Structures are given as C-alpha cells and as structure tokens.
Image: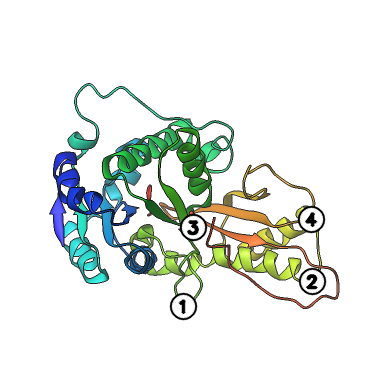
C-alpha cells in the first residue's frame, strides 16, 4: 500500500489505473478504523480494481472543539489495518492540504440538512461534511465511493450533492456493522468508559423496541416512538432527537405506511452517538421479520 499526502501525489498514484480504465473505489474515513470501515474496504476490494482509503479528521464538520480534540487518532495503526484489508492507496492529507491559505468555498445542500443532525449540530456541520466530501471526490475522482448506513442523513446529503453537481461518481452504502451486543460500531465508542459503554446499549434497544412493535402491525408513529423512548429509560438516557422520517426527504411521518427511517442521537457522558434503523409496515397477522437498513441506499466521512 502506498501512502500519499498531497493531491498531486494522489493523482500521480492513480494516473496509471485511470489511463488503463481500471475501476477506482474510494472509502472516505476520519480514521480510528474499525470493522465497519473494513467491511467497506473489503467490498471495494471485491468490486473495484484499485482501492483508495482516505484518512482525514475534518475540522469543518465539528461544532464542538472538545469533540474534535478528543477524536481518536492513530495513523500508524490505521495504515496497518487499511493495508491488511486490501487498500492500494492511503490518502492522509494535512488540514493545510485540504484547506489551504485563502480557501473560501463551501458546499451546502438545502432541504435535507435542516433536520436531525442539522438541527442538533447546526448548519455548519453539514456544510463541513458536504465541502470535504466534494473535495475528496474531486481529488480522487473515483468511479464509486462507499459509505456506512449508520450516518444515514449524511448519505442522503452526499447523494444530493453528487447528483446536483453532476459528479461522475456512484455513491453506495452498506448496512451498519454492529458489535455482538448490538451497539453500532463507531470510532467514538473507544471514548466510552465501561459504565458508559453499557448505557450506550440504550440506542440499539430503542431501535429494537420500535422495530418489534412495527412487526406486530403497529402503524402509528406516535406509538412506535413511545416504545423507543420507553426502552431508553432503564439506561437513564435521554435522546437529543428520536424521529421517524421519510428515508429520502427526512420529513417526519405520522403513519408507517411504507419504509421509514427511525433515527436517534444521544449523549452518553461526553460522547455523542447516533444510530438508525429502517422500519417497514406489515399487515396485522402477517409473518413478522426484522431487517437491517437496505445497503443500496450510504466516514465524515465514515466515523
């Protein structure tokens, strides 16, 4: 695996593959790689001839300085993991390379950024995400870029910007990868104390409670959300938001008549976690099944 730190080096490294018409896949990450990231790298290895992993902790998408400072960083470890997973190129630019002196351009996607994470973290968060992802896609010029479903709203935003800006890249997603006890894998999990790690199970418990109720034929968003909130109480966790929304527009729904996204964010101590699930309606008395979110849908890049 080759590690490069500048846009010029990245383009030079990818030039032979591009000339030969080989497919290039990109996995954008903020490092602290875990099995969720590796599932993306493995899929790119299967589907693409050249695998690029980017490693960049994007300061523009953090609305709290403390969160940025605490974000785990270990480039040597990440490089070893990426290489073992099959990456051909690791792009690890500096902040100055991504945002050089005089940088004055941002990308903003309207209509799907104002709710959920946008409401909780402010408009600057998704401007930071949209800007850095646009830059990474333009820097690497991949044929396809892979993201994780855990950041469901981010994927919706990225699909919008790729479409609206006519970027020649396909955006694909994989279902959330979870720990054996159900907690969604996240780089921030490493910041949890043992007690906080146990309380973090409130998030998957809330999703499971709503999904189980939906599987009985319940269609009321109000009752589904109440079931999710009730599941949080034993863990002494209050959500920043807990909403059932349209998967593409992120507008809230009152009745589960088709697939909907149940999204949650909560603070466990000083660590902020997010998670989501797709709820699907069934007719009362129909066979009950549980399902993970569809993979064909979504680091900031994957975190």
Compared to residue 240, the image places residue 83 above or below, namely below
The quadrant holding residue 303 is bottom left
Residue 176 location in percent, x, y?
A: 48, 64
Upstream in the sequence, badge 4 or badge 2? 2
Disc 1 and disc 2 in contact, CB within 8 angstroms: no
Q: Which residue is mark 3?
A: 150
Residue 180 location in percent, x, y?
A: 46, 77
Q: Nearer the viewer, residue 146 or 264?
A: 146
Tell me the number on the disc at residue 180: 1
Q: Nearer the viewer, residue 49 or 288?
A: 49
Residue 47 location in percent, x, y?
A: 37, 65
Disc 1 and disc 4 in contact, CB within 8 angstroms: no
Tell me the number on the disc at residue 216: 2
Q: CA distance from mark 1 to mark 2?
A: 25 Å
Q: Nearer the viewer, mark 1 or mark 4?
A: 4
Asked if residue 71 shows in the view, the reply is yes
Asked which secondary structure carries label 4, the reply is: loop
Asked if residue 62 shows in the view, the reply is no
Tell me the number on the disc at residue 257: 4
Upstream in the sequence, badge 3 or badge 1? 3
Disc 3 and disc 2 in contact, CB within 8 angstroms: no
Q: Nearer the viewer, mark 3 or mark 1?
A: 3
Q: CA distance from mark 3 to mark 2?
A: 25 Å
Q: CA distance from mark 4 to mark 3?
A: 23 Å
Q: Nearer the viewer, residue 230 or 118?
A: 118
The quadrant holding residue 236 is bottom right
Position of residue 10 in the picture relative to residue 192 (left or right)? left
Q: CA distance from mark 1 to mark 4?
A: 31 Å
- Residue depicted at x 16% and y 62%: 1
């Amino acid at each position: 695996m080759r590690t490069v730190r500048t846009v010029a080096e990245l383009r030079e490294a990818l030039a032979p593959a591009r000339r030969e018409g080989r497919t290039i896949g990109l996995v954008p990450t903020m490092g602290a790689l875990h099995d969720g990231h590796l599932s993306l790298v493995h899929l790119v290895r299967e589907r693409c001839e050249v695998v690029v992993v980017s490693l960049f902790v994007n300061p523009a998408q953090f609305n709290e300085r403390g969160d940025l400072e605490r974000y785990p960083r270990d480039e040597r470890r990440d490089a070893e993991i990426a290489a073992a997973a099959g990456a051909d190129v690791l792009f690890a630019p500096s902040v100055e390379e991504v945002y050089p002196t005089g940088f004055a351009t941002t990308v903003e996607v309207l209509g799907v950024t104002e709710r959920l994470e946008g409401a909780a973290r402010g408009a600057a968060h998704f401007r930071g995400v949209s800007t850095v992802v646009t830059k990474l896609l333009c820097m690497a010029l991949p044929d396809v870029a892979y993201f994780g479903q855990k950041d469901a709203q981010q994927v919706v935003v990225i699909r919008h910007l790729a479409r609206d800006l006519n970027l020649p890249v396909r955006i694909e997603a994989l279902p959330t990868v979870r720990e054996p006890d159900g907690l969604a894998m996240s780089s921030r999990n490493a910041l949890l104390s043992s007690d906080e790690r146990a309380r973090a199970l409130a998030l998957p418990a809330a999703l499971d409670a709503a999904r189980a109720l939906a599987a009985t034929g319940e269609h009321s968003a109000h009752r589904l959300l109440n079931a999710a909130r009730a599941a949080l109480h034993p863990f002494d966790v209050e959500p920043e938001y807990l909403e059932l929304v349209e998967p593409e527009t992120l507008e809230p729904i009152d009745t589960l008549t088709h697939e909907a996204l149940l999204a949650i964010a909560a603070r466990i101590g000083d660590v902020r976690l997010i998670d989501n699930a797709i709820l699907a309606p069934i007719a009362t008395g129909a066979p009950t099944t549980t399902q993970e979110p569809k993979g064909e849908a979504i680091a900031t890049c994957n975190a």
